[in-house]
Amino acid sequence: MRRVRLAVAGLVGAAVLAGASGCSDGEEASQTLPSTSRTAASPSETLPPLGPADFPVPAEARQQTEAGAKAFVQYYLELMNRAQMRMDAEDLRPFSANCTTCDQFVDGIANYRQQGYRFDGGDISLRSASKPAFIEQRVDISVNFEQAPYRILNSAGAEVLDLKSEAVEYPASGVSLTWQGATEVWRVSDLTIGR
């Protein structure tokens, strides 16, 4: 898989998925699921909400199952889109498990905000995802991301010419999630964007 830099808002002069920087530890994804003797955790009805008050992690994304892992990836992407729209990505930090790319995204949004920039377009979508591969408390998922066309506008509303892109697809991407048992939620430990 060829890796490209993640264009993290302001840090490398492009936006969100215009490139990639993974935080992979180089492990190969397992092609097997845990044994059937393992019981999947399901969120209890007394779990405190996580995430922004007006956009909490949905119950299905708080399950230690294949469906739960995929639901969490979808939630995380929606949270990234929300961050671009609001120019505030701090709500993503609690869901990073030392994921360098994730942390760079948050810092990049803050950098753009400080410069008075804002996104016009650029929504990130999940086109497809593989069957999650479980390794202990971690799951690896191969994904195909797409980012819609975007422009970056300055505080006067003028386009920053070197910070724009047409729609781009990233079919050779991946996400690794780590299960946080105490709060019954997934956290992103690796986000790799590849073309």
Image: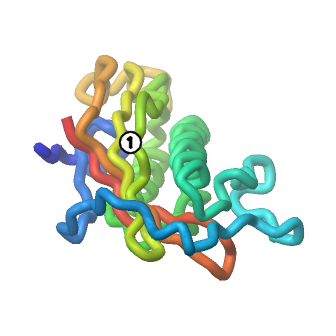
Residue at the image point whose x is 70% and y is 54% from the top? 57
The amino acid type of the residue labelled 1 equals Ser
The quarter of the rendered structure image containing the C terminus is top left
Residue at the image point whose x is 60% and y is 53% from the top? 68
Mark 1 neighbour class, 10 Å CA radius: few under 14, some 14 to 19, many 20 or more = few
Residue in the foreground of this view, choosing between 38 and 64: 38
User: Residue 169, located in which quarter of the rendered image?
Assistant: top left
Asked if one can make out residue 87 in the rendered structure from this viewpoint, the answer is no
The quarter of the rendered structure image containing the N terminus is top left
Rendered location of residue 50, percent (x, y) = 72, 63
From this viewpoint, which residue is outermost toward the right? 46
From this viewpoint, which residue is outermost toward the bottom? 182
* 119 to the left or right of 52: left
129, above or below 140, in the image: above
* 41 to the left or right of 180: right
Give the residue at mark 1: 130
User: Residue 147, located in which quarter of the rendered image?
Assistant: top left
Q: What is the secondary structure assignment of the residue under circle 1?
A: loop
Rendered location of residue 149, percent (x, y) = 38, 19
173, above or below 167, in the image: below
13, above or below 95, in the image: above
Asked if one can make out residue 122 in the rendered structure from this viewpoint, the answer is yes
Residue in the foreground of this view, choosing between 23 and 67: 67
Residue at the image point whose x is 45% and y is 68% from the top? 34
Residue at the image point whose x is 45% and y is 63% from the top? 177
Rendered location of residue 47, percent (x, y) = 81, 70
Residue in the foreground of this view, choosing between 16 and 64: 64
